[in-house]
Amino acid sequence: MHNYMPNSLAGQELLSLNETRQLMREKLTGIVPDVEIEIKAELAYKINQLKAQKNAVILGHNYMEPALYHSVPDFVGDSLELSRISTETDADIILFCGVQFMAETAKILNPDKQVLIPAEKAGCSLAEGISVENIKALRAAYPGAPVVTYINTYADVKAESDYCCTSGNAPAVVQHLFDLGHEHIIFLPDEYLAKNTAADLGVEYLEPILEGAAHTLPNEKCIIGWNARCEVHELFKVEDIHDVRKQFPEVSVIAHPECSPEVVNESDFSGSTKQLIDYVQNVNAKQYLLLTECSMGDNIAAENPDKDMLRLCSFRCPYMNLITMEDTLAALENIQYEVHLDADIIRRARTPIDRMLAIS
Ligand code: 13P
Ligand code: SF4
């Protein structure tokens, strides 16, 4: 196993209700109201019992709300880490506390296991923003250009792609293709991640054109994007950063690369959710302003009680927030909601994911 941060409770022997309550209080007091800790400790206890009985593993994305995040996942992480971990488990059931595209990725990597997600409708605005027909139209417009697809897409879209990437390895994946001699790379579906990746690599970003596109291509390396955005990260504005810097001149601003290039430019650091967590742990700053889903700020604060986290908490991911402890318990009780994918889609979607995992 890699040394991913195991959850503070789940790394231990099966705990009694009192031990569960005690450890959750130690971690979450001051972050979550006491009354909520009491209720959620009971849920955590039941979930961890059932998890052991059913030989399940729980993978939790970094955006999970703090009580869930700190009590039931065996592993927490960003999309890349959780994909890797899903390939290393002996459990019969993978219960994914994250959104649909993440659970689908775990299923693609583990076709013979039961993969469950606690809420059926946990989507993602990026995954909704691109279709198989869109990729086919782009391939026709830019013949020969390889397609790199962000992991925030559904399985049918991955199946049409050459490589996958995540927010943690997008520049490495695109650079790999440049090194193989490709000049023009189609990068889907997140317009902002594509622009931020192009800026990182010092290459031009081109808006996609479906008619007469070949004539617009430069004689040098470039990334051709698409027009989907994360409905949460697109809300952060440069003015927000300026306002906070006025009040806290020494603040370190850290942003997810799904934010606009302007916001990323004004920030001190940008990276995947795991890279943002590592930044706070490893870099000393007076305060930190985290520009991503707000629950993660609570999770970082719980892990780093000595650090001063400022957050703009008006923006929540409505899909990640559908994953509750109640539904996580119901998922194990009723073995719901199982991810089912067509065998041919699984086979074709696996190639771009494997290629990505081999690079980074
Ligand atoms: P990470 O892979 O960085 O965790 O991002 C997933 C995501 O959906 C961010 O909005
Ligand atoms: Fe999708 Fe944005 Fe939610 Fe991440 S934060 S799951 S990219 S909608």
Image (cartoon, helix red, strand yellow):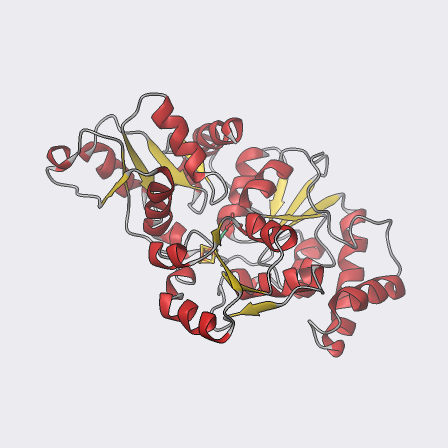
Q: Is residue 133 above or below residue 118?
A: above
Q: x, y percentage for residue 196?
A: 36, 47
Residue 336 drawn at (x, y percent): 62, 53
Q: Residue at x 85, y 66 (%)?
A: 22
Quarter where residue 339 is shown: top right
Q: Give the quarter of the figure containing the N terminus.
A: top right
Q: Residue furthest top?
A: 180
**Horizontal side, residue 255 vs residue 112: left or right:** left
Q: Which residue is found at the position 42% from the left and 37% from the top? A: 171
Residue 245 left/right relative to 7: left
Identify which residue, 119 or 282, lies in the foreground.
Answer: 282
* Image quadrant assignment for residue 330: bottom right
Q: Is residue 333 visible?
A: yes
Q: Residue at x 36, y 21 (%)?
A: 180
- Farthest front residue? 249
Q: Position of residue 261 (x, y in %)?
A: 35, 54
Residue at (77%, 54%) from the top-left corner? 8
